[in-house]
């Protein structure tokens, strides 16, 4: 008598009942549909039925956040239309205000022990306008680290703030004033103009802060700073006075880089050198027509008292009006007879001495060099050496003054470039013009051509401070990465010049220096009056009285402002209270931990912070500097408004239509041709505009680009891929939460003994991801950290374990189902905490939906960051399971290659008994993971006889002793054509292998990042595996052909 089957339990019975009901419903619907078709008129059947248009779901109105500002967000169910699928605007709403109001951004330890501090001073964005993708990259990198360290238990502090950006801000406001009221700052006066700038600053300052909030930056806004705040202004004055008293700040009348358009001096770092190869016409601010550059103009000077002339050449003919000498090489025999004589200036009648100097290159031009000591840096040195006259021919606005002579006085400098040549031609002194490669110094801000101009200014002696700043980098006290940035830092500081810190501006820190003007002094005497410095007017008055006793005098403050980078150089210490070294923040958080910034301001800012901090506090301002790459467009071009490739991060977060993007080009100062060019680029790069991606996807994309290597070519298509990743995170979490019963209670600790092999595998992979992400963030390998996170969540948790869990949750025993539920919960909880530093909004939204464990805090940002657990290392089980995954992957790959849609017959051939046993143990998991196209999977062991081996199979090599075969003979109609196709693929793969091998041994390859090296090595491994697969498949197909031939003969 047969055994009576056990009665199903209540759960199984209910499931069976539901399955049968679903089948019945489906059958009833099908029957009704067939009946309806039969009832239709016969003639209608003859007419092709038009395909019904796909009904588009109506677009949802924009999400409206109904959570009161600062309150914790009310969680909506997944069936809410705004939360059924991933919706960035709905997901990212409300959380930031709650985080901020709850004080989560403050530097407090949220764990059981205080393990230290981690402090980043935010590089303050200029207050001049909107954030760009470079800011978004910096904020993403910094916030990722801040959130990671916070979750690890550190007291983290990220201090936000803005820079007053002297030149940029004053220029923007002056343009606005002229556009609105047709007034200049001179019409308003200094006090009223400064008041106007403060009003403008307050408006734009908030725009920047709001953008940083939308990005998710967890900055402590209670400590927000501005470079012209009271304390930061006091720190700036303190620094000037201290350095002056030590003799490190001095006043000197010497050549500076002068921008005639902005009417101010610039440091050498604020000058861009544009290289041209020959004659070039360039736009110059203030000129209607383009100006000629890259031309060497030859002309002659008459030699006084003779009929001789001396021929010279110059790329700046207008400067000849300020010439006071001519230099030749002492070894040049052409001119030895003229040394010591004088040339006569044809327009000013000035005598100019001819001097000998080894500086002169006899091979360049004519070998004779005209000298304009007051308008050329090289000539300045020669003029000092030979005692020549320094003749300034320029007014501050770039027009020629009385020293240029009555014929030219009042002309613009580049208009005079042409009139000088015309007048020389009239006098018969012009010789010729010829093309000449040269560098043109341009103002970084205005693109005006810089003029060297002699001006009395304040300077900082740099050599002593630079030596100290070099030492702390060379001895490792301050670590700068990547290595290319460190080398650039050392190279620049090893060849540093003194720093001109005077700027002829009204917006900024007015220099705390006062000219002492004695009673009865005339104007000429005032120029030589002494100076007194003081932290304020009262201190300066007291100092002057102590120094000059009973003399009657008045103090006149220097109207100039300090270079913006002077006050910015104090940022890490001034935001923490310096010069008050007893300030609690300074005591606890200085030196800061890290500075993250762009390599392009390594010299402007980073080096000066290190120099000033060492000088004023005796400490470094931070112990680590990480320099991120510059962001370029998808074509590798530098981002520029005139190219239309500047992307506002807020447009990526919220989305923007193409026409609105075009409209943004019209708000600004672009010329018509620039607008046309920019519009064309936008149509190509963003044909449908930019879809809403959200802050999380933007952050993850920027982090994934950060390899520590070269510049970043930003492609919006990559952003779309990570937007889809966020949707995957959303849908996977939704699935897991939907599989947890209403009374689910998370286990405090997983029951290791009850875990299945798939569960051990996912926990092992999770543990590996935890280890690798922590290591990557510790070593600042941001791209690697996102790659590991993506691979774990997408490829392993979603594509493998969640798929595998479906059969366990539907067909497993109650114990197996409960274990799978606990494993799903645990891996999702760990995954959300792992992802939080990268994706703060979506992880908070989803983590809040998880059933709570004892000890969970109020927010995922305060939860413990996952740490590697040795108890979850299941190396052996993971290897066995991965063998099954590789087999399933091989079957899927072959099915796709040969278009097997259903009932595929797959075989796994093991050449060893051990291999056969491992694969057989995984067979229950291999089949569902092989896809719906496969109907059966059979294991063939080493003892399988010849008759059981399949024929007409495509082959996929899994390991040295495991091979996957898929019968494809039914899909092949022409065996010769198939063999030819595979032979071609084999040849191409061989060529690819050779090229890849050459790449890996190419000189310099060892210097690329580890991420790139690993990717290229994987390519080679993939090519080699493909080659072996093609070879084995050819063997199979050749046998198939032989078999077909034998049958034909029979």
Image: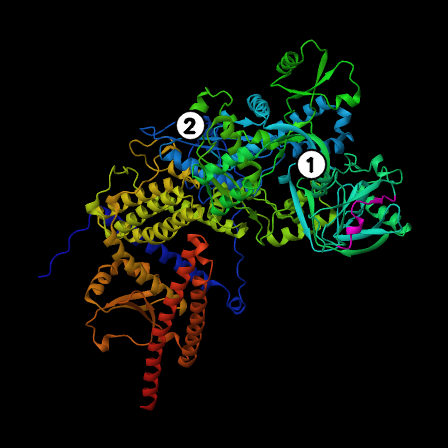
> In the image, 221: left or right of 306?
left
- The one nearer the camera, 118 or 322, is 322
What span is colored magenta in the figure?
A: 333-346
> In the image, 501: left or right of 187?
left
- The one nearer the camera, 983 or 897, is 983
Q: Is residue 698 visible?
A: no
Residue situated furthest top in the rendering = 550
Q: Quadrant of the C terminus?
A: bottom left
- Measuring 30% from the left and 43% from the top, which residue is drawn there? 868
Residue 144 in the image, given as x and y percentages of width and height? 44, 39
Residue 52 in the image, given as x and y percentages of width and height? 53, 58
Report which quarter residue 936 is drawn in: bottom left
Q: In this picture, is 772 found above or below 434?
A: above
- The one nearer the camera, 347 or 609, is 347
Q: In this picture, is 847 found above or below 531?
A: below
Circle 1 is placed at which residue position?
Answer: 256
Does the magenta segment cover residue 877? no
Query: Which one is closest to the eye, mark 2 or mark 1?
Result: 1
Helix, strand or loop for disc 2 = loop
Q: In this picture, is 292 found above or below 535?
A: below
Q: Quadrant of the N terminus?
A: bottom left
Does the magenta segment cover residue 344? yes
Residue situated furthest bottom in the rendering = 1049
Circle 2 is placed at which residue position?
Answer: 107
Quote the CA–CA distance across marks 2 and 1: 44 Å
Residue 251 in the image, given as x and y percentages of width and height? 66, 28
């Amino acid at each position: 008598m047969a055994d009576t089957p056990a009665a199903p339990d209540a759960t199984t019975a209910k499931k069976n009942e539901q399955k049968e009901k679903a089948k019945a419903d489906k059958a009833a619907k099908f029957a009704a549909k067939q009946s309806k078709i039969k009832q239709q008129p016969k003639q209608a059947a003859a007419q092709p039925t038009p395909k019904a248009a796909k009904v588009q779901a109506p677009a949802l109105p924009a999400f409206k956040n109904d959570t009161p500002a600062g309150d914790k967000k009310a969680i909506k169910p997944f069936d809410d239309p705004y939360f059924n699928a991933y919706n960035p605007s709905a997901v990212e709403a409300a959380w930031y205000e709650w985080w901020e109001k709850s004080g989560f951004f403050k530097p407090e330890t949220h764990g059981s022990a205080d393990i230290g501090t981690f402090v980043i001073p935010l590089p303050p964005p200029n207050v001049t306008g909107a954030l760009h993708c470079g800011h978004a990259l910096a904020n993403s990198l910094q916030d990722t680290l801040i959130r990671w360290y916070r979750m690890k238990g550190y007291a983290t502090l990220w201090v936000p703030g803005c820079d007053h950006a002297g030149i940029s801000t004053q220029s923007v406001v002056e343009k606005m004033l002229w556009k609105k009221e047709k007034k200049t700052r001179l019409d308003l006066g200094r006090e009223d103009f400064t008041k106007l700038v403060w009003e403008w600053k307050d408006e734009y300052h908030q725009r920047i802060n709001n953008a940083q909030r939308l990005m998710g930056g967890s900055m402590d806004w209670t400590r927000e700073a501005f470079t012209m705040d009271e304390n930061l202004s006091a720190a700036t004055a303190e620094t000037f006075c201290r350095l002056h008293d030590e003799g490190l700040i001095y006043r000197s009348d010497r050549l500076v880089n002068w921008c005639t358009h902005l009417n101010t001096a610039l440091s050498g770092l604020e000058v861009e050198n544009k290289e041209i190869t020959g004659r070039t016409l360039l736009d110059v601010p203030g000129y209607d027509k383009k100006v000629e550059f890259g031309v060497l103009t030859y002309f002659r000077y008459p030699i006084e008292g003779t009929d001789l002339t001396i021929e010279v050449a110059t790329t700046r003919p207008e400067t000849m009006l300020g010439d006071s000498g001519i230099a030749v090489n002492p070894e040049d025999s052409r001119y030895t007879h003229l040394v010591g004589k004088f040339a006569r200036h044809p327009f000013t009648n000035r005598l100019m001495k001819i001097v000998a100097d080894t500086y002169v290159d006899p091979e360049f031009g004519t070998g004779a060099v005209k000298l304009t000591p007051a308008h050329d840096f090289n000539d300045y040195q020669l003029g000092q050496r030979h005692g020549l006259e320094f003749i300034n021919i320029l007014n501050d606005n770039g027009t020629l003054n009385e020293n240029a002579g009555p014929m030219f006085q009042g002309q613009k400098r580049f208009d005079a470039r042409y009139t000088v040549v015309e007048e020389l031609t009239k006098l018969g002194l012009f010789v010729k013009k010829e093309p000449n490669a040269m560098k043109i110094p341009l103002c970084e801000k205005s693109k005006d051509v810089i003029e060297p101009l002699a001006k009395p200014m304040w300077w900082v002696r740099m050599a002593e401070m630079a030596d100290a700043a070099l030492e702390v980098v060379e001895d490792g006290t301050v670590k700068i990465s990547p290595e290319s940035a460190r080398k650039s830092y050392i190279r620049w500081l090893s060849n540093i010049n003194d720093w001109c810190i005077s700027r002829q501006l009204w917006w900024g820190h007015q220099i705390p220096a006062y000219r002492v003007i004695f009673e009865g002094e005339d104007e000429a005497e005032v120029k030589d009056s002494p100076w007194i410095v003081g932290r304020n007017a009262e201190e300066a008055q007291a100092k002057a009285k102590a120094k000059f006793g009973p003399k009657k005098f008045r103090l006149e403050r220097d109207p100039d402002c300090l270079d913006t980078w002077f006050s910015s150089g104090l940022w890490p210490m001034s935001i923490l209270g310096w010069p008050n070294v007893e300030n609690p923040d300074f005591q606890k958080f200085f030196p800061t931990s890290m500075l993250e910034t762009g390599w392009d301001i390594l010299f402007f800012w980073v080096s000066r912070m290190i120099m000033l901090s060492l000088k004023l506090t005796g400490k470094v301002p931070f112990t680590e500097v990480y320099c991120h790459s510059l962001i370029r467009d998808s074509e590798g071009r530098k981002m520029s408004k005139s190219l239309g490739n500047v992307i506002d991060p807020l447009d990526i977060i919220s989305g923007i239509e193409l026409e609105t993007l075009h409209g943004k080009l019209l708000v600004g100062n672009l010329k018509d041709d620039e607008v046309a060019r920019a519009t064309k680029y936008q149509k190509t790069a963003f044909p449908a505009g930019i879809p809403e991606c959200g802050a999380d996807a933007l952050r993850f994309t920027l982090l994934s680009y950060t390899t520590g290597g070269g510049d970043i070519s930003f492609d919006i298509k990559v952003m779309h891929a990570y937007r889809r990743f966020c949707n995957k995170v959303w849908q996977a979490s939704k699935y897991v939460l939907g599989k947890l019963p209403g009374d689910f209670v998370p286990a405090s600790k997983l029951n290791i003994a009850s875990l299945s092999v798939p569960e051990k595998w996912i926990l092992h992979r999770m543990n590996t991801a935890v280890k690798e992400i922590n290591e990557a963030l510790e070593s600042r390998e941001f791209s690697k950290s996102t790659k590991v996170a993506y691979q774990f969540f997408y490829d392993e948790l979603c594509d493998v374990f969640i798929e595998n869990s479906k059969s366990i949750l539907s067909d497993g025993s109650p114990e197996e189902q409960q274990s799978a539920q606990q494993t799903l919960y645990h891996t999702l909880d760990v995954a959300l905490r792992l992802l939080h530093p990268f994706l703060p909004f979506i992880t908070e939204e989803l983590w809040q939906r998880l059933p709570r464990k004892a000890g969970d805090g109020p927010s995922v940002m305060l939860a413990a960051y996952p740490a590697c657990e040795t108890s979850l290392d299941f190396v052996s089980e993971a290897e066995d399971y991965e063998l099954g995954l590789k087999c399933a992957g091989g079957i899927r790959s072959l099915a796709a290659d040969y278009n097997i849609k259903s009932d595929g017959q797959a075989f796994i051939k093991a050449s060893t008994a051990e291999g056969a046993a491992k694969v057989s143990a995984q067979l229950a998991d291999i089949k569902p993971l092989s896809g719906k196209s496969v109907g059966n999977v059979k294991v063939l062991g080493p003892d399988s006889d010849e008759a059981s081996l399949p024929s007409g199979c495509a082959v996929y090599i899994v390991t040295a002793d495991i091979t996957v075969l898929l019968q494809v003979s039914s899909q092949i109609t022409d065996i010769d054509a198939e063999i030819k196709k595979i032979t071609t693929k084999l040849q191409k793969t061989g060529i690819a292998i050779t090229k890849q091998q050459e790449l890996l041994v190419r000189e310099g390859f060892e210097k690329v990042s580890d991420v790139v090296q690993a990717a290229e090595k994987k390519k080679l491994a993939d090519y080699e595996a493909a080659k072996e697969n093609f070879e084995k498949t050819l063997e199979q197909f050749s046998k198939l052909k032989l078999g077909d031939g034998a049958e034909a003969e029979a």
